[in-house]
Image (cartoon, rainbow, N blue to C red):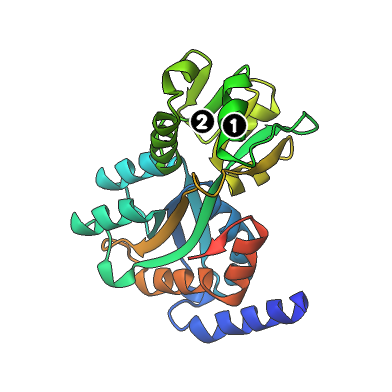
């Protein structure tokens, strides 16, 4: 079944690739976070084989990538958190008519692979797990952090956790947990799945969960706008959706 999907995907690429031929192939630069690199890593090779275009994904925390776009760094496509893309569209940094919600991810808790998994199945259990943990790591800035800060305030434990909380400036939450530098990590679930030494305890309890939507749009200064629009379509194609689900997300 997957083989048939792959064949259909490649045929779809060939049909859509009216703007890109090997003779005038281009390198498309995509700004995003790790979730973008995961999906493009799956669907990019077939796209490159069919069109000759190379897809280069530049990643960091979405907030950092947004600032780089605001600083007029050249790019073809941005895949950032939805409210960040909307703000960049308002500022004229991305094209409104290319905007597309492509995937969304829930927030989860990570432990080092093989370590005991605390109970986080209820709000009370999640609160106690955080209080019992020797150390916790999450992003210094990011959509998941904005939500988590609200959750910790709501639970009344923000001050109690401050001394044992590490706020990392990069997308290294799961790596720090895998290395034993923090007992618990809190970040979007696909980030955890991408690190072999980390393991998902589970998603946040339903009452506390928030889904981060990742939205794509094309740069108005891109010299490869038709091809860039095709790449966004490919992220929404059956093969793109298959990759999104495989990597612990849902289509947008």
Which residue matches tag 1? Answer: 185
Q: Is residue 49 visible?
A: no
Give the farthest residue toward the right: 114
In this rendering, the answer to whether 87 lies above or below 103 is above
Question: In the image, 37: left or right of 151?
Answer: right
* Quarter containing the N terminus: bottom right
Name the residue at 45% across, 52% down: 212
Q: Residues within 10 Å of mark 1 (few under 14, many from 20)?
A: many
Which residue matches tag 2? Answer: 138
Measure the C-alpha gap from mark 1 to mark 2. 6 Å
Nearer-the-camera pick, 135 or 60:
135
Report which quarter residue 82 is drawn in.
bottom left
The numbered mark at residue 13 is none
Q: Residues within 10 Å of mark 2 (few under 14, many from 20)?
A: many
Decide: marks 1, 2 in contact (CB < 8 A)?
Answer: yes
Nearer-the-camera pick, 151 or 67:
151
SS for dot 1: strand
Q: Earlier in the sequence, mark 1 or mark 2?
A: 2
Question: In the image, 147: left or right of 50?
Answer: left
Q: Position of residue 63 (x, y in %)?
A: 36, 41
């Amino acid at each position: 079944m997957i083989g048939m999907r792959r064949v259909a995907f490649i045929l779809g690429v060939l049909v859509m690739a009216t703007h890109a031929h090997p003779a005038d192939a281009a390198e498309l630069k995509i700004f995003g976070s790790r979730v973008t690199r995961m999906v493009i890593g799956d669907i990019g090779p077939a796209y490159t084989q069919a069109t000759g275009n190379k897809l280069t994904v530049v990643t960091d925390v979405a907030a950092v990538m947004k600032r780089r776009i605001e600083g007029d760094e050249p790019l073809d496509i941005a895949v950032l958190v939805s409210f960040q893309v909307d703000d960049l569209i308002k500022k004229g940094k991305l094209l409104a008519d290319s905007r597309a919600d492509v995937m969304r991810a829930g927030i989860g808790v990570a432990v080092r692979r093989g370590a005991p998994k605390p109970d986080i199945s209820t709000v009370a259990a999640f609160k106690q797990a955080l209080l019992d943990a020797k150390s916790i790591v999450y992003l210094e800035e990011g959509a998941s952090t904005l939500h988590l800060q609200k959750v910790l305030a709501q639970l009344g434990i923000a001050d109690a956790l401050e001394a044992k909380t590490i706020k990392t400036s990069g997308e290294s939450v799961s790596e720090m947990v895998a290395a034993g530098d923090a007992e618990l990590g809190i970040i979007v679930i696909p980030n955890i799945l991408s690190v072999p030494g980390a393991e998902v305890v589970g998603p946040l309890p339903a009452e506390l969960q928030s889904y981060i939507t990742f939205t794509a749009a094309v740069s108005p200064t891109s010299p490869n706008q038709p091809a860039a629009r095709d790449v966004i379509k490919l992220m929404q194609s059956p093969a793109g959706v298959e990759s999104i689900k495989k990597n612990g997300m849902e289509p947008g």
